[in-house]
Structures are given as structure tokens and as C-alpha cells.
Amino acid sequence: MARQYNPVPRQYLSRSPLRDQLTIDFLSASFPNPFRGLAPVYGANISRANLLRPYPHFSDISAEEPVGYSWYHSSQWRLEKRFAHGYTLQLAYTFSKLMEATSFLNPTDPLPYEVISSLDRPHRLAASGIWELPLGSGRRFGAGWPAPLQLLLGGWQLGAVVTRQSAAPLDFGNVIFIGDIKNIPLPKDRRTADRWFNTEAGFNRNSQQQLSYNLRAFPLRFSGIRGDDQRSWDFSITKDFPLHERLKLRFRADANNGFNQTNFATPNRTPTSSAFGAITSTDGDARNWQLALKITF
């Protein structure tokens, strides 16, 4: 994980949960740059904040350190009906929690910040099934059909895959929040694309009052505040056409996201934005068809 080696020392940063204009004015004050001419990036002036860095003649200095870690717990269940009587079914469910410490809340913190992972998905359900239609030679119906009818109607196989998954936890950045965090999420029946969470729970949305030069205390993300759950229904239909002895032609048609369900992307989490709390894009593809022919021998 990345470690910042040239931050502004923490003793100069504000610990106020509100905008500390005195600290901002102090650290943003400009002085003649003693390093001017050392490199094109150094101008005539330099801020006090940059002069207070451990290495003021450089800007940010970062390097990768092997100090990050994560831990995962899950309960996994699987139910399977093996192929018999023309069909097979599989059902898998995972209940899990993924925590991580792969970043620092503040560059000067001695240890990584432990928080729910951005990859955490508490619930995941996946079900799949295959059904051989009981039509044609060797099946329940149509065993005596003439060859042309067997070729047209016999041997079809239907398949489906259903996936449901929890959404990712949301992060809001280093914001000013004066309120109860429990009031941020909205009940499912009150969520809309225009207002996914409670934007009036206590966020300061005034662009002139946002934080700067402060030690962050607001968490990186929240387990109980998430985006839209992901869901998909995929369907397929296949049929084999015998051509000659071991030569076989397989036709397959797939309908991905067959019901054309909309999966929303994450909502805007910038309090100063006019779109704060709104979802402005989707995640994943709309329904699409794929047709394929394959020859096996």
C-alpha cells in the first residue's frame, strides 16, 4: 500500500470538525521560494505548508510498503440437483464480511485504518439450471417423429443463471457531518435515483465551509450505507445438429440480462455537488443477445 513520506506534520493541522480558517490562513500563507530554480515545478513563491514538510524542496513523496492487511469470514452454502430426468439445478449462497486496512486515514497516521472493504458484499446468491426439453428421439414426447421434425424440434436445451448480490459500501470523503450517521441510509421504499440516501442527515453542503488542512476523523466508508444491489437473469438455448458420424454442429443463443433490469451505479457523494445523493449512471450492460455456431469433431 502507498505510504506518504512528505506530508505536512500533523501538529500543524487542525483537529476541529469544522472549517478552521485560522489554520488554513496560517498554512496557505505565501513566502518567497528559497528553492526557486532547482526545478521547473518551483515558482517564485511557496506556501508555509510546503515549507513545513520534512523535505520542503520536494512535493509529495510516496512509496509502497508491505503493511496493509485484510481479513475475510464467510458462511457458504450449496445445493445441487445432479442431472436426472432431463434437468439439473444448482444453488449457491454466501454470507460474508470483508474488512481491510489498506490505506491511511491521514498520511501521518502510524497504522493503516481498519474499515469495511470496498469489495465487501455481505450476500451473494447464484442459481443455475439446465432443462432438456422432453421432445424428440429418446425423450418423453416425439420419439417417433419423422427425421425433419426431429431435426427441427428435438434436442433443445434451455439454461438460466440468476445472480443477486449486495452492493458496495459507500464512502463520502473528508466531509463535515454534524448529525447521527444512522440517519444517512433511507429505507428501501423511500430510495429513488434522485435521492438514494438522506442528504439532510447532517452534511454541510456549503462550498465555502469545507475542510482543509485538518486531521480527518470521518470514516472512510460505512457498512450500513450502500449502493444499489446487483441482479441479473441470463438465459440460453442450445441445440446440437448431427452432421456426420462424430461431426456435430452446436447452435447457442444467449440473452444476457434477459429481463433488461437496471443496475444503478453508486450515487454522488460530494456534498457540495448539486447532484449530491443522486444516481446519474448505471452499472453493467442492458439486455444483449449473442448467437454462436460451433463445430465439434
Image: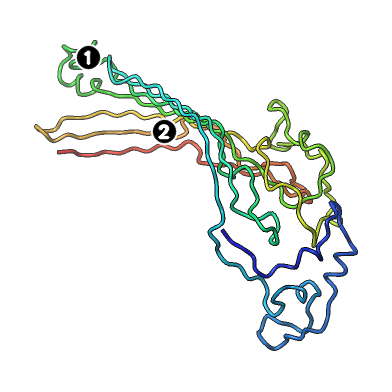
Give the spatial CA distance, label 1 vs label 2: 26 Å
| As drawn, 156 above or below 8 | above
Sequence-wise first label, 1 or 2: 1
Q: How crowded is mark 1: few (under 14 residues within 10 Å), some or many (20 or more)?
A: some
Q: Which residue is drawn at 86% across and 53% down?
A: 18
Q: Mark 1 points at which residue?
A: 139
| Residue 115 percent across, percent down from the top left | 64, 45
Image spot of residue 64 (x, y percent):
55, 63
Point out which mark residue 80 bears: none
- Taking the view exactly as shown, the residue that stands out farthest to the left is 245
Q: Quadrant of the N terminus?
A: bottom right
Task: Name which quarter of the figure residue 46 lies in.
Answer: bottom right
Nearer to us in this view, 87 or 181:
181
**Which amino acid lies under the numbered mark 1 shown in the image of this protein?**
Arg
Tell me the SS state at disc 1: loop
Horizontal arrangement in the rendering, residue 25 relative to residue 196 (left or right): right
Residue 254, quarter of the rendered image = top left
The tag on residue 255 is 2
**Where residue 19 sits: x, y (%)?**
86, 56
Give the camera-side residue of 51 and 141: 51
Residue 33, how many percent across, how many down? 77, 84
